Image (spheres, rainbow, N blue to C red):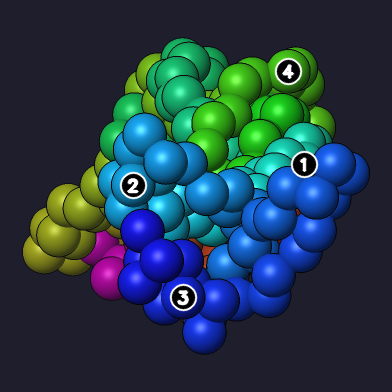
């Protein structure tokens, strides 16, 4: 027992308490001599001191933030075709150009330590409605002008008739008057007569190209 006690005193500091009981402070543990247990008591104290665990590092608390984020979405426009009686058939045209609208969705986004972990839709609204595209389809029959009537072809003057007139035979004479008129001949013609050249007998008094009418 003395050898064990002497060995501990070399490693620790001997302390004397009340009543003269000696104890030894070794590595932060107070050891009193025990005649019944011998060296086992010292070994147990040293092992208990060595097995003490270090103080654990506290776990950092995560930083959680919530932000509102707006996301814009396009609303596609639709198209219709309407009949237009003011347009000819085949003359279709886009009379109203379509435009996409805009919808804004607001999300509540949760970030944990700056990383997005969840999001939920908070609200949505239409910022601008779409504009419908309109195509006008012509239904009117196009106007077709009638073909002009062919000009009358005067009959060739028979032999002995003046070629300046057509439609009736104006005889070749010193003077010709319209039949039933006030002229005194000596020759007469019954109209109507078309003046084709020079009105040598002055039969077309009103100058409309038709004599004796």
Counting from the top left corner in percent of width and height, residue 203 is at: 59, 55
Q: Main secondary structure of the magenta part?
A: loop
Secondary structure under badge 4? strand
Q: CA distance from mark 4 to mark 2?
A: 76 Å
- 197 to 29, vertically: above or below: below
The Cα atoms of the two marked residues, 1 and 3, are separated by 65 Å
**Is residue 67 placed above or below 55 in the rendered structure?**
above
Sequence-first disc among 4 and 3 = 3
Q: Work out which residue is located at the far right of the displayed protein and give it.
A: 18
Q: Closest to the observer: 66 or 90?
A: 66
> Residue tagged by mark 3?
6
Please state the extent of the stretch shown in magenta in the rendering. 161-165
User: Which mark, by number, is residue 38?
Assistant: 2
Q: Which label sits on residue 101?
A: none
Q: Which element type, helix, strand or loop, lies under badge 2?
A: loop
Q: Residues within 10 Å of mark 1 (few under 14, many from 20)?
A: few
From the image, tell me which residue sits under label 4.
122
Quarter of the image with the N terminus is bottom left
Q: Disc number at residue 65? A: 1
Does the rendering let one see residue 7?
yes
Q: Residue at x 46, y 24 (%)?
A: 78
Residue under the point 52% across and 49% down: 33
Residue 173, picture quadrant: bottom left
């Amino acid at each position: 027992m003395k050898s064990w006690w002497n060995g501990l005193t070399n490693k620790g500091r001997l302390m004397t308490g009340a009543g003269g009981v000696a104890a030894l402070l070794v590595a932060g543990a107070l050891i009193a001599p025990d005649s019944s247990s011998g060296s086992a008591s010292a070994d147990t104290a040293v092992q208990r001191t060595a097995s003490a665990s270090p103080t654990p590092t506290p776990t950092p608390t995560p930083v959680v933030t919530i932000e509102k984020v707006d996301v814009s979405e396009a609303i596609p426009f639709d198209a219709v075709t309407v009949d237009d009686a003011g347009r000819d058939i085949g003359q279709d045209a886009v009379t109203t150009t379509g435009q996409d609208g805009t919808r804004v969705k607001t999300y509540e986004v949760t970030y944990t330590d700056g990383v997005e972990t969840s999001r939920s839709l908070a609200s949505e609204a239409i910022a601008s409605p779409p504009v419908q595209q309109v195509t006008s389809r012509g239904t009117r029959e196009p106007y077709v002008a009638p073909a002009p009537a062919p000009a009358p072809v005067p009959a060739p003057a028979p032999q002995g008739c003046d070629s300046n007139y057509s439609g009736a035979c104006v005889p070749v004479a010193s003077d010709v008057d319209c039949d039933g008129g006030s002229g005194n001949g000596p020759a007469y013609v019954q109209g109507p007569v078309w003046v084709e050249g020079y009105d040598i007998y002055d039969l077309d008094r009103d100058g409309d190209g038709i004599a004796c009418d």
